[in-house]
Amino acid sequence: MCDYDEPLYLISVVAKILGVHPQTLRQYEKEGLIEPSRTDGKMRLYSQRDMDKIKTILRLTRDMGVNLAGVDIILRLKEKLDELDNLNKELQDALHKHSKNTKTPTKI
């Protein structure tokens, strides 16, 4: 099984798989929407996580008509929501653990 973040795909492969021009991927990088890894020879390598993010960008731009500035805002908000969701889960776990260790359980 491959690591979700392991850089595996060259720009030409990603472009072919996703049906976009390599220049589109370069533009997404220039706009700060994606950040592929680089080889020692400066070739771009994309992970499965990068591919999924590009699919999201394409869905937003093609299907929903969102411009790249809007995509950037949406992606940043999604990152923040994911961070808050993870923090919420950690706090819920800590509260649950604390409740188990006290005589009077704390309500969640």
Image: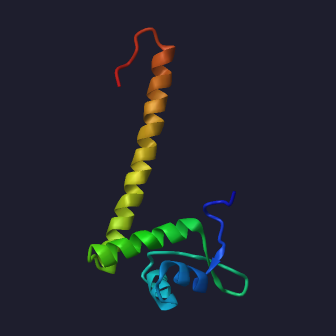
Task: Give the camera-side residue of 103 and 5.
Answer: 5
Residue lying at 60% horizontally and 69% vertically, measured from the top left: 47
Task: Give the camera-side residue of 20 and 95.
Answer: 20
Colour scheme in the image? rainbow
Percent x, y of residue 30: 46, 85
Name the image quarter holding residue 68.
bottom left
Percent x, y of residue 8: 66, 73
Quadrant in the picture for the N terminus = bottom right
Residue lying at 50% horizontally and 87% vertically, measured from the top left: 26
Percent x, y of residue 4: 61, 61
Residue lying at 45% horizontally and 8% vertically, measured from the top left: 103
Farthest residue in the right direction?
Answer: 40
Q: Is residue 8 above or below residue 76?
A: below
32 relative to 72 in the view: left or right:
right
Percent x, y of residue 86: 46, 45
64 relative to 50 in the view: left or right:
left
Farthest residue in the top direction?
Answer: 103
Residue lying at 33% horizontally and 66% vertically, measured from the top left: 74
Quadrant in the picture for the C terminus = top left
